[in-house]
Image (cartoon, grey):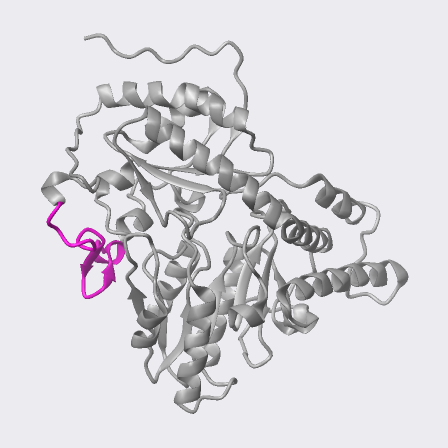
Amino acid sequence: MKFTSFPKIKTKRTVYLDHAAATPMDPVVFEAMSPFLQDEYGNPGGLYKVAREAKQAVDNARESVARIFGAQPRNIIFTGSGTESDNLAIFGIARQYADRGKHIITMSIEHHAILHSVEALKKEGFDTTYLPVDEYGLVTPEQVIAALRDDTILVTIMYANNEIGTIEPIADIGRAIMRWKQEHDRKPTDPPFFHTDACQAADYCELNVEKLHVDLMTINGSKIYGPKGTGVLYKRDTVRVKPLIYGGGQEMRFRGGTENVAGIVGLATALGRAQGMKEKESNRLIKLRDYLWAEIRRKIPKVVLNGHPEERLPNNLNVSILDIEGEALLLYMDEYGVALSTGSACTSESLDPSHVIVGIGKPYEYAHGSIRFSLGRETKKSDIDYVMKILPAVVERLREISPVNLQLDEQGRPKEDAKKPVFAAAFAGDGMPHWMGRK
């Protein structure tokens, strides 16, 4: 049997298409951070000049982030990552308001920083409702309201999904929760509170918390061309949270530990840069993303788009390439200098199928062949053309050695599964996510 030959490329290049995992640092951000990495080394907690200068830098960064959020500086808590910010929101609310209720609402396709946190709270007696999503990964305000109970203290719905890029109707959900609270004689200081993980959305979406009607919001630096190991939790004045880290009372006593001055300055600079260029950059990336998808459909048969075709991040394209293993494709593409992902970078060492792809009703075969292309500021059309010189041949070769050969119906679903309900593969029963059912 003669196999397809892998393409021969005279000059290999590096094409990084995994910006959803991490972004390169903006040179302007590095320049803003540099003084605090060596020369201006003071501890912001001191009273002498070098310490006061460090404190002023942190204060300036806090004011900058607050302006973008439409908030006050006192509402901004700097943390060590988006995951820490998510944890502070979830555990902080749960332990602060446990006497008011122990029910939390989230989505089945959340980031694991959320899913694992609410799972851990089960050991403390908390109950979680996992809202299913439609075939595009969307949840509705009506679903959220229907799930609210008298003992609900927190609703946490991510702004934009890190794998499939679907953007959730956060503002509509926030307004619906506000109306529910008013109808049930709940004050702004009463639960339930609304949190969103906006780490993937911060580059491209509206972040004004008054327009979004959120009580808590998470972002991080590594997704917005800022430094890794930095994060922010916005907390509305009417919300109280118990800290996770105790120490010297830094961050208004919500997060102990000497402030990472350089990181904080870098995050604030990166956020300002991202929001300032979001409209122009979004338009550019949408054209590149759509061009890539058109080329994939033209040159590779049996491919399926994952996520909403329109309500999605400008830089995100998640495609199930059937009859292959995604991990194998990544390794071959890496040989040509192309960096891609099969899903969340935080779970890349796991061979379990993506809970997001399965969660939108796709069979396991779709999940194992899902590839995430996430474009960035340095991505050019020539990069897409380079990828498309290589990708079709690699896919064809992998299919030749694959034991899987799915037959599809007109909707792009396996014929043997055509009559199954859309959520059949995603849930084990009673609305429980498949990853809980396996346990």
Please say whether residue 253 is one of the residues in the magenta stretch. Answer: no
Asked whether the viewer can see residue 343, the reply is yes
From the viewer's perspective, is 182 left or right of 357?
Answer: right
> Residue 404 appears at what percent x and percent y?
18, 29
> Residue 285 appears at what percent x and percent y?
53, 40
Asked whether the viewer can see residue 90, the reply is no
Foreground: 311 or 238?
311
Foreground: 312 or 250?
312
Q: Residue at coordinates 45% horizontally, 80% vertically from top-left?
A: 178
From the viewer's perspective, is 372 left or right of 219?
Answer: left
Indicate whether 7 appears above or below 280.
above
Q: Residue at coordinates 52% horizontally, 16% vertically from top-left?
A: 12
> Residue 234 appears at what percent x and percent y?
58, 67
Indicate whether 357 appears above or below 143.
above
Number of numbered labels in the structure image: 0
Foreground: 414 or 47?
414
Please say whether residue 432 is one of the residues in the magenta stretch. Answer: yes
The quarter of the image holding the N terminus is top left
Indicate whether 242 appears above or below 389.
below
From the viewer's perspective, is 284 left or right of 402?
Answer: right
Q: Residue at coordinates 52% horizontally, 66% vertically from top-left?
A: 88
The quarter of the image holding the C terminus is bottom left
Residue extending furthest right? 49
Segment tinted magenta in the rendering: 418-439
Indicate whether 285 appears above or below 224.
above
> Residue 213 appears at what percent x and percent y?
51, 72
From the viewer's perspective, is 375 left or right of 56?
Answer: left
Residue extending furthest bottom? 185
